[in-house]
Image: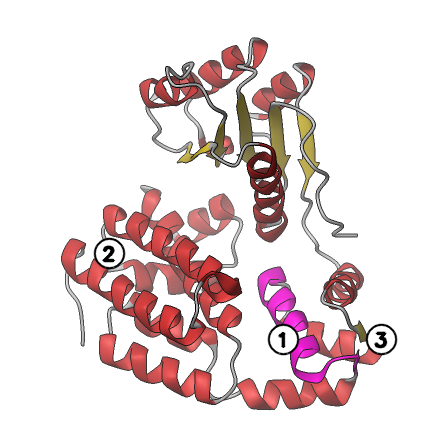
Amino acid sequence: MAAAPPAPTSRLRAVVGEEELLRARAVSAVRAAVLERHPDAELYELPALGLPVGQLADVLAPSLFGGHRLVVVTGVHEAASALVDALTGYAKDPDPDLTLVVVHSGGKRNEALLKAFTAAGAAVDECPKVSSVGDRIAFVRNEVRSAGGRITPDAASALVEAIGADLRQLSSAAGQLVSDFGGTVDADAVARFHRGQAEVTGFTVAERVLVGDRQGSLEMLRWALQGGVAHVLIADAIADGVRTAARVSSLRTTNLGELARTLKLPPWKVKKAQSQARGWSIEGLQQAIGVAAELNADVKGAAASPDYALERAVRRIVAIRAATGRGVRG
């Protein structure tokens, strides 16, 4: 399970399912394949919620300058009917110099769009929820294997029990375990890993960043790095926090139960995101998402110093909140 998504074979593609990490990986695989074939391709990522049809039409219109384009429209389950009609109409006669990917989180809403894309020959990446403990253990084993190691059955079970259902955290932990312990990861390695992460985690840093606590963010970041928390774990936590705050803020309702159902998140996570989103504007969160995306690339090798990349990203996100939001601490 959780095998790498196949390379794109169609100018139309649908990424469908509840599992956010698998959706993100599928989109990344398409992006990498497009850039391999078209290194100078223009890249666009547009959220469907609130997207004007005219803006979509501009992006999909034939380019005057030639060259390939990749357009990813996320959250199409939330798209207005006019946008669905525009995407459906485009699918009937797609531009050969453009790869269009629609991302749907599953469910019945706007299911007709997916059917229209499939009927038009779109390739489909299925990203179903990894809901059972057995499937999460299998996911961990695959992640460890992909990182070049192997994990004993009791260690895989211990890791899933400690972390839970969040695939991003499971993936990050699996990679860090292989990096730290190499070869075979056993239950003792998992226990030592978690003891080392106990006091300050990436989520501790992310919480300080999101509330605009500049001094506290930098202090927690330094403690986390000194304690051996992986750069990618911190970056993932910051990205997850910013994205979740943006998703909560983008919806008109503040009802906890309704938000949890719509976003398919546990109520405790929605409540935390609501608290962290206070003081942010939508514009600011969009800018912060861009910083988090840059940080993800930086900690995976794009930056000469991942320590510096993290500190710079923390400072930038806190500054964005202060400049565009409704108040800041620190």
Q: Of the two numbered discs 2 and 1 on the same chain, state the one appearing first in sequence.
A: 1
Left or right of 228, for residue 212: left
97 lies above or below 160: above
Q: Secondary structure at mark 1?
A: helix
Q: Are marks 2 and 3 in contact (CB under 8 Å)?
A: no
Q: Residue at x 68, y 36 (%)?
A: 125
Between 40 and 164, the residue placed more toward the observer is 40
Dot 1 alpha-carbon crowd within 10 angstroms: few under 14, some 14 to 19, many 20 or more: many
> Extreme right residue here?
153
Q: Is residue 271 visible?
A: no
Q: Is residue 330 magenta?
A: no
Q: Which residue is mark 2?
A: 280
Identify the mark at residue 79; answer none if there is no mark.
none
Q: Residue at x 48, y 44 (%)?
A: 262
Dot 3 alpha-carbon crowd within 10 angstroms: few under 14, some 14 to 19, many 20 or more: some
Q: Main secondary structure of the magenta part?
A: helix
Amino acid type, mark 1: Gln
User: The C terminus is located in which quarter?
Assistant: bottom left
Q: Quadrant of residue 304?
A: bottom left
Across and down, in percent, residue 264 comes to 53, 49
In the image, the segment drawn in magenta is 166-185
Q: Which residue is mark 1?
A: 176
Q: Are marks 3 and 1 in contact (CB under 8 Å)?
A: no
Compute the Cα span from label 3 to label 1: 18 Å
Q: Quadrant of residue 168?
A: bottom right
Q: Which residue is mark 3?
A: 153
96 lies above or below 27: above
Q: Is residue 290 visible?
A: yes
